[in-house]
Image: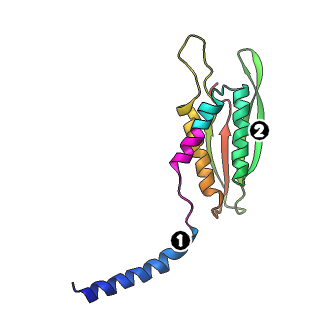
Amino acid sequence: MNWRSLASRAAVLAVLWLALAGTALAAAPEPFDPDRALDHARYLSETIGDRPAGSTGEQAAAGWLAARFEELGYTVRVQPFNFSSEGQQRIGMNVIATRPGQTGYGIIYAGAHYDTVKRIAGIDYGGPGANDNASGVGVLLEAARVLASETVTPTLTFVAFGAEEL
């Protein structure tokens, strides 16, 4: 293949790439950032720490999650619910973040639980929940960030579930 043939093929490919990918590149979402997801998981597991269902840790996490979703532009609702644990009535919370889509195109749900197993004295059980499930919540928040500025047809609903570890 001579230089002239190679140059003309490169020119054709460049024109096709600009014609086909130019619009897609302008509208491409910001990429998923695993470091951001990890930062969220660290905050939940290290700064907030233990988050057993109905605890002040779970309440702190719910408030923090609601604030993160609101910063991303989602409409946020905290859904309290009653449950019984160890003979006591407690309150858990789901954090629901929604971005409306077009009518008639349905809803896409994504969720992760943010509470942790309760620590039991003298037993290596429970804890700050980095892998169960702060990591899942970190991914959930990062996915919400990536999709926050995207044009989507269905409604997007992200749910951070409380009291899953009962």
Tell me if mark 2 has few (under 14), some (14-19) or many (20+) residues whose alpha carbon lies within 10 angstroms of its own: few
Q: Residue at x 62, y 43 (%)?
A: 111
**Where in the figure is residue 121, as x and y percent of width and height?**
60, 12
Report whether 8 appears left or right of 119. left
Q: Which residue is mark 1?
A: 24
User: Sequence-wise, which precedes: disc 1 or disc 2?
Assistant: 1
Q: Magenta stretch containing residue 64, yes or no?
A: no
**Where in the figure is residue 17, as x and y percent of width and height?**
44, 77
Q: Please, what secondary structure does the residue beneath circle 1 have?
A: helix
Q: Magenta stretch containing residue 39, yes or no?
A: yes
Tell me which segment is drawn in magenta: 28-41
Report whether 16 appears left or right of 46. left
Looking at the image, which residue sits at the far left? 1
Q: CA distance from mark 1 to mark 2?
A: 38 Å
The tally of labels here is 2
Instruction: In the rendered view, tell whether residue 75 sits above or below residue 64.
Output: below
The dot on residue 65 is none
Report whether 132 appears left or right of 60. left
Looking at the image, which residue sits at the far bottom? 4
Q: Which residue is mark 2?
A: 79
Q: Looking at this view, is 108 or 151 the one in front? A: 151
Q: Are marks 1 and 2 in contact (CB under 8 Å)?
A: no
Q: Could you tell me if residue 94 is visible in this image? A: no
> Amino acid under label 1?
Ala
Q: Could you tell me if residue 81 is visible in this image? A: yes
> Amino acid under label 2?
Gln
**Where in the figure is residue 39, as x and y percent of width and height?**
57, 42
Q: Residue at x 38, y 84 (%)?
A: 12
